[in-house]
Image (tube, rainbow, N blue to C red):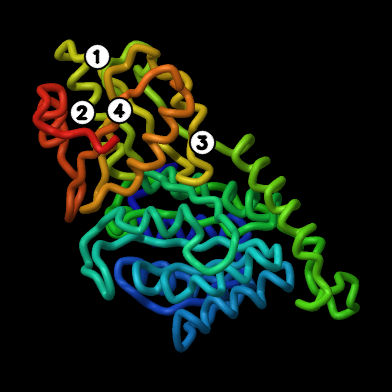
């Protein structure tokens, strides 16, 4: 039965029901309610909760828990996630599974408290040092966030990788009806440390980095082939296809439906995985499409690069224009998206590619 829940609390409960039994982190708006909820909830289910002295300490505790085979979780936003990057890189380097939640807020440096999508490039490129990627899931509703929590851990363990749940601040602070999933029974990962040295650790000078590089390429190729997720609507006959994720994806879907009702041939691709990027969705776009239009909650337009590359890969015989509509501070309303669509159609907005 659905109940009204605040986003961060629903997300935290979903993680517990998906088998998360360790949380370490440091408070930061707009994600703090996740750790506040887990500060008492973890004890109820036999898990462990630590409010660390810093984001650096928190992510390193997650490394320890993941090495011991526990489903581990941390959450933060903006500069907090920046501080966790070396630890995320280490998790990927060691082939350890974990889930990292980021409720994105706007701005450089310490930034602001406004909801945003300005961290897309960091999350989809691997924000720390080295040669790695994280799977990045970007839900558009609290219910979808909740529903993706178990798959996030399953993907993390299947590929021995970090899965980033990239929401926006809005998703953490808003309230919506939510149906919570059942609890799942989990086992320690088979590569976990167990006190008997069953799973041997290899020292940095004993590793075959060339062999590991080949294995990484194969792993990431398998993820790109098998794990692309998206929602699409009306793209087979569209003259213009919008591309938007997260909460702006919801608003864009509303704009697409209203525009279609008014006779405009438009469609939508809503990425659910920001990495691997859903290139397969673009292959289904009308071959005579006149352009693609990203709708992004940031100042510079970040996803436009991936969208433009995807349409180039899938429609190699044509140079299809790619436009970016960018909106700073809060989700663009349907009315604004529709107004800017007509500016694109009338040639008032210059293409990015």
- Nearer-the-camera pick, 351 or 252: 351
- Indicate which disc, 2 or 3, sits on the residue closer to the N terminus: 3
According to the image, label 2 marks what residue? 255
Relative to 159, residue 203 above or below: below
- Indicate which disc, 3 or 1, sits on the residue closer to the N terminus: 3
- Nearer-the-camera pick, 256 or 32: 256
Choose top left, top right, bottom left or bottom right for residue 294. top left
Q: x and y percent of residue 296 in the render?
A: 26, 44
Quadrant in the picture for the C terminus: top left
According to the image, label 1 marks what residue? 265
Instruction: Count the marks.
Output: 4
Mark 3 residue element: loop
- Which residue shows up at 27% across the image and 47% down it? 301
According to the image, label 3 marks what residue? 229
According to the image, label 4 marks what residue? 292
57 lies left or right of 247: right
Quadrant in the picture for the N terminus: top left
Q: x and y percent of residue 201 in the render?
A: 82, 74
Mark 4 residue element: strand
227 lies left or right of 218: left
Relative to 248, residue 106 above or below: below
- Indicate which disc, 1 or 2, sits on the residue closer to the N terminus: 2
């Amino acid at each position: 039965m659905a109940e009204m829940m605040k986003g961060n609390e629903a997300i935290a409960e979903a993680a517990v029901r998906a088998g998360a039994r360790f949380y370490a982190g440091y408070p930061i708006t707009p994600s703090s309610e996740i750790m506040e909820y887990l500060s008492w909830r973890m004890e109820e289910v036999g898990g462990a909760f630590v409010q660390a002295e810093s984001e650096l300490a928190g992510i390193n505790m997650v490394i320890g828990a993941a090495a011991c085979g526990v489903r581990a979780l941390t959450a933060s936003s903006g500069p907090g996630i920046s501080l966790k990057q070396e630890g995320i890189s280490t998790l990927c380097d060691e082939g350890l599974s974990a889930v990292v939640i980021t409720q994105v807020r706007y701005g450089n440096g310490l930034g602001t408290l406004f909801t945003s999508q300005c961290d897309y490039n960091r999350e989809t490129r691997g924000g720390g040092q080295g040669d790695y990627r994280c799977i990045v899931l970007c839900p558009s509703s609290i219910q979808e966030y909740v529903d993706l929590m178990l798959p996030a851990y399953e993907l993390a363990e299947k590929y021995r990788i970090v899965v980033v749940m990239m929401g926006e601040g809005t998703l953490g602070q808003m309230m919506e009806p939510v149906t919570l999933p059942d609890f799942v029974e989990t086992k320690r990962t088979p590569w976990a440390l167990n006190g008997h040295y069953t799973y041997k650790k290899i020292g940095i000078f004993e590793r075959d980095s060339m062999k590991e590089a080949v294995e990484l390429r194969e792993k990431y190729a398998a993820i790109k082939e098998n794990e692309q997720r998206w929602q699409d609507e009306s793209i087979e006959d569209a003259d213009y296809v919008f591309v938007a994720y997260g909460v702006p994806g919801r608003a864009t879907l509303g704009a697409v439906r209203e525009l279609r009702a008014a006779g405009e041939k438009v469609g939508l691709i809503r990425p659910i995985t920001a990495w691997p990027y859903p290139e397969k969705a673009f292959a289904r776009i009308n071959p005579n499409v006149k352009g693609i239009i990203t709708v992004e909650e940031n100042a510079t337009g970040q996803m436009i690069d991936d969208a433009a590359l995807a349409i180039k890969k899938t429609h190699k015989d044509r140079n299809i224009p790619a436009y970016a509509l960018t909106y700073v501070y809060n989700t663009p309303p349907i009315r604004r998206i529709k107004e800017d669509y007509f500016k694109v159609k009338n040639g008032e907005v210059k293409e990015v590619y």
